[in-house]
Image (cartoon, rainbow, N blue to C red):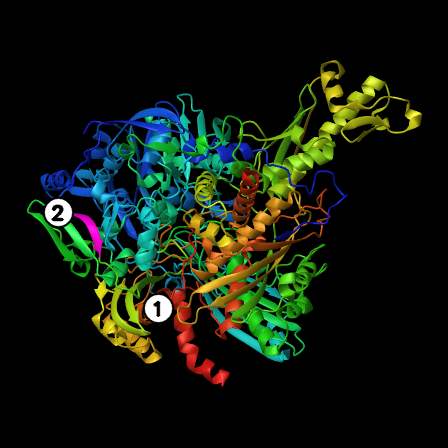
Amino acid sequence: MAKIHVNTTINGAPTEFLCDANQTLLDVLRDNLGLTGSKEGCGSGDCGACSVMVNGRLVCSCLVLGPETEGMKIETIEGLAKGDRLHPLQKKFVEMAALQCGICTPGFLIASKALLEKTPNPTETEVRYWLAGNLCRCTGYDKIVTAVLEVAAEMRESAR
Amino acid sequence: MSDVQYKVAKTVREAAGMMLAAKGKGYILAGGTDLLVQMKSGARTPGVIVDVKKISEMVSVVEKNGAFTIGAATPAAVLGEHKKLRKAWPGVIEACNLIGSTQIQGRASAGGNLCNASPAADSVPALVAAGCVVNIAGPKGKRSVPVEKFLAGPGKTTLKPGEIVVSLALPKRPKGSSDAYLRLIPRTEMDIAVVGVGISLTMKGGTVTDARVGLGAVAPTVLLVDKAAKALIGSKLDDAALDAAAAACSAACKPIDDKRGTIKYRTKIAGVLLKRTAMIARDRINGIEHRGHRPV
Amino acid sequence: MSHAPNTTGKYKWIGSRPDRPDGADKVTGRARFGADFSLPGQLIGKVLRSPHAHAVIKSIDTSKALALNGVKAVITAEDFPDQPNLIVPTGEMQVNMRDITRNIMAREKALYEGHPVAAVAAVSEAIAKQALALIKVDYKVLPHVIDVADAMKPGAPILHDHLLTEGANPPATKPSNIAKRIEFKKGDAKAGFAEADVVIEKDYTTQAVHQGYIEPHATLASAAEDGQVQVWSTTQGHFQVRGFCSRLLGLDTSQIRVTPTEIGGGFGGKTVVYLEPLAIRLSQKSGKPVKMTMAREDVFRASGPAPGGNVKVKIGAKKDGRIVAAECIVEMQAGAFPGSPVGPACMCSFACYDIDNVYIEGFDVVSNRPKVAAYRAPGAPISAWAVESTLDILAQQLKMDPIDLRLKNAAKQGTKTAYGVTFNTIGMVETLQAIKDSEHYKTPVKPGYGRGVAAGFWFNIGADSSAASHVGEDGSVTVISGNPDIGGSRASLALMAAEELGVDYNRVRPVIADTASIGFNFVTGGSRVTFATGLAVVNSVRDMIRELKVRAAKIWKVDPDAVIWENGMAKPAGANVGTFEPLTLADLAAQAGRTGGPINGHAQLNVTGAGPGFGVHCVDLKVDEDTGCVTVGRYTAAQDVGTAIHPSYVEGQLQGGAVQGVGWALNEEYIYNSKGKLENPGFLDYRMPVASDLPMIETILVEVPNPQHPYGVRGVGEVPIVPPTAAVGNAIARATGVRMVDLPMSPPRLSEALDAARPKRMMAAE
């Protein structure tokens, strides 16, 4: 079968690409579009390093086919900062040392952003369960969870 | 260049036609959280992938007079956000929302979970306990079958060539009813169920008037454990009744030893979870919430 | 919650928590890891792996694969020269080159499921996979052996016909799977046990576990027609990669330029090579760059897990808790080739304690599993599981507080270990006391919970580092070193350089150079970077300061000895030298050309004097008696860290290592079936802790400065993984009365043990 021509919006920009029917969105992002910020840790949806948003929904991009994204809005880590302004989550992760090697960080940031958009006031337990699909082997999760809770508090404060 | 074809179906009829034409090499793509993993490992090699997510009746939840028709390809996360469905069937919802991670639930569907037919599928014990009916469409028209009769074995359903599952129907609830689902996993998330128990109860004046028990991950397909239900019906969920129902679940088990659990362990846990799910369902009937850890 | 170190006022920059220099790149996806590099025209390389745990390779026919359209190169063991019997260090372990060449590509035999037997490079991944399927390998399947105990039995399938047990007594004459026997003695253990009032003796087992780094191995190699090779690799040691590839391929080290990419976790597992030599060879044969990545299943099957082992421990003590004799026998998995960390496992076993009479024996045993690699304090967690559990039994029997028992026997300055080293300034006592004084320990255990404590030790190493520094025309500084940053070390190096120079941390830029652009550096591992590379960085900055003073002296026309460096400026040493305005870095840099040329500093040394580390962990947990599931309620990790250069990253090491240890304790293990195939090569069934499994991990940073480092640094990265398994096991024992001896303590196993003990426990309750 010939390659499929797909039209999407990625990080707000109209983006088109050609892909095989069985090529995953993760492979399209990384290999076709040079957006290597989303990572492959397992390729089977068990680690969350490839997390992106598709039409406002948090998903593993290794479990989405490229052609499925026709007409959809995709948000990746590359779109989190606005110009040279880091998102509060990005700033807080650096500030609080919520990363060591950094490979899981893009996935955690996308997943955390999705959480705070849905629930502005999560408890520590809710944060941990929401992020259970993102594996981190370096930090033991402590500083990641603390950073997310602090950003949640700050965002609620500035929303007043 | 790849040999696989990707097609988007706009209607149920179209989807069924595509599947029939694929002559056994067609696979439905709902959330893809099983199919893509199997394609990567080589366990499944589709000739045609039929995407059904543009078919509105397959991705929506319709409520009519207290009964629900759940589109088979509706993501678990969407089900979890449906307030009325959650209120009527908290057990079914919590079962669907235990599949994988937040990311998986953004895509995985109850229909896909059912049709993948893993003996350990999380949604199925709760659907069995709920008395769910599976609505199927195919080249010979429509038919419906109770969910406990839908599965044929590990990885196998009773669907005929060209048939697809369109929706899952949950009946109207009598007053004083609720349900619950619990699974045993070694960690707190992300594991395949070692044992899964779904229970649905109706109670009046403290006495159980109706019960259904679904038991998963302990046999080639999910079991409807009549004996456990009978032990509970007419009781006040006292220790004797719970013990008897638990024993019935343990007796109904036909588990295996594998990398996730032993026969001995699974058999024991089946009984342990029966008691716990019964308590949760009863609490819910009495207005006590068991919300779990997921944000609303 | 964490406790900040008490460095207020002592240092200006050290001890603060500024943003790490690579932070913006890492939170935006800009930072590039191993699989993120590509070159135009590159080919994709894929490896064909043995499906058999043990088999003779009779022949390999690659002709059909080579003929497939789109395939540009195919390699087998024939493409690599054989290697001599030569031991080389790799991180804290040692490997034999003869074994390494066979591990990267099987020669006579396939020795584990997943063992590479051939590799291809093709224009696409799909074609590469097709090509693999066209390679015909004629195997003669042999009986295999997986477990250490089975591999040691007479009549077990033998992996290597040439392998005679080194150190056997009497000397070995027949081939064996026991590669080595080692022994450490202090005093007279037999006599010591005879003096003891109480003797506890118990056998323990652990299973193989994987480091679990989230980033699979990945490399990109580009070989040119003139023999120059460029490699990008996710590695803990790019000089190591260069060295291995140089030997394996017969190239000069100067012909190979290795650039370390950002690394997505290593923990010891990326101190060896798997893909790099293959990628280089494929690139040489095809004339194109070759990119290779490992699939997750192959990472589990065919990289280097940490060994499992069987450990027998015997401890004898007086009634008052004084330990008079200790014995430890360790049988450890090496995987398919010799070289388990049985040495460190033995050496660390009683290192936390001052014991007069010690006997330790260890066995390095091969079997048909992947060759083990380092994993954070290699070997130590295995013996610590056994020793620290036994100490807990002793404490229970003597009705002594477990911390007090350890304080009574704690190693101190002047303690001589069983492996012959006498400790300098160490922090074992201080760390025990820190737990004893902690809020956690002072809080009563909640009903239904049990509390466990355990200690752990790691030597930490120094080894070779090279560093350079130079100042730009505007006075901002670049500091160059050669260690991949796996945990935030760039920030620590910049902090030390800023402190030394007396300039703002934000004006110091740390850079990690490739193998051509800086002198030799040993791997990032052994908890050595902040210590040893930090020392090299400090020395290179001091070298630069020496030169800056010379320049100031020239400008002022005074003797260089009359110039001091203070707060980032050159100043006259005293009023008698003359009245001169201080000269800043910027001032001096601006005049560099006129005063003698560019102002650079460099240092290169083999660093000794690494301070050993001690950790003590405390955990409160409860056990669901019906299901055997464990809930960790509270966890505190205390450790002597020397000086916490960047406290956040030091805390991070304690937290990360503790959580890896919790996973090791509760759920992680390699599961093989009867055919010698790995049943759980994925994150679904290789169960590492997820965020919802844990509470916050409290850390206590005890600062006992290492006198052998200008800023008192001790390595911190490895110690934290040593105590957790026994801390968890001891807590389970305290919570349930059941003593587990086998890891992992997964729910089915714990449930079984609880059920078996039920009659006894019910009697005890009556």
Question: For the view shown, which residue lies furthest in the left direction?
Answer: B140
Tell me the kind of residue under disc 1: Arg
Q: Nearer the viewer, residue B227 or A29?
A: B227
Where residue A137 sits in the image (x, y, percent)? 48, 48
Say whether residue B168 is magenta: yes
Residue at image coords 52%, 56%: C695
Residue at image coords 50%, 35%: C27
- Mark 1 — residue? B282
Q: Secondary structure at mark 2?
A: strand
Q: In the figure, is residue C641 to the left or right of B208?
A: right
Where residue C281 sits in the image (x, y, percent)? 37, 32
Q: Residues within 10 Å of mark 1 (few under 14, many from 20)?
A: many
Real-space Cα separation, disc 2 to disc 1, in angstroms: 36 Å
Question: For the view shown, which residue lies furthest in the top direction?
Answer: C594
Question: For the view shown, which residue lies furthest in the front direction?
Answer: B65
Where residue B217 sits in the image (x, y, percent)? 27, 62
Q: In the figure, is residue C501 to the left or right of C718?
A: right
Q: In the figure, is residue C413 to the left or right of A22?
A: right
Where residue C354 sits in the image (x, y, percent)? 67, 65
Question: For the view shown, which residue lies furthest in the right direction?
Answer: C576
Q: Nearer the viewer, residue B92 or C647?
A: B92
Q: Quadrant of residue C722?
A: bottom right
Q: Is residue B164 visible?
A: yes
What span is in magenta?
A: B163-170
- Mark 2 — residue? B137
Q: Chain of mark 1?
A: B
Between disc 2 and disc 1, the foreground one is 1
Q: Is residue C166 visible?
A: no
Is A115 rendered above or below residue C146? above
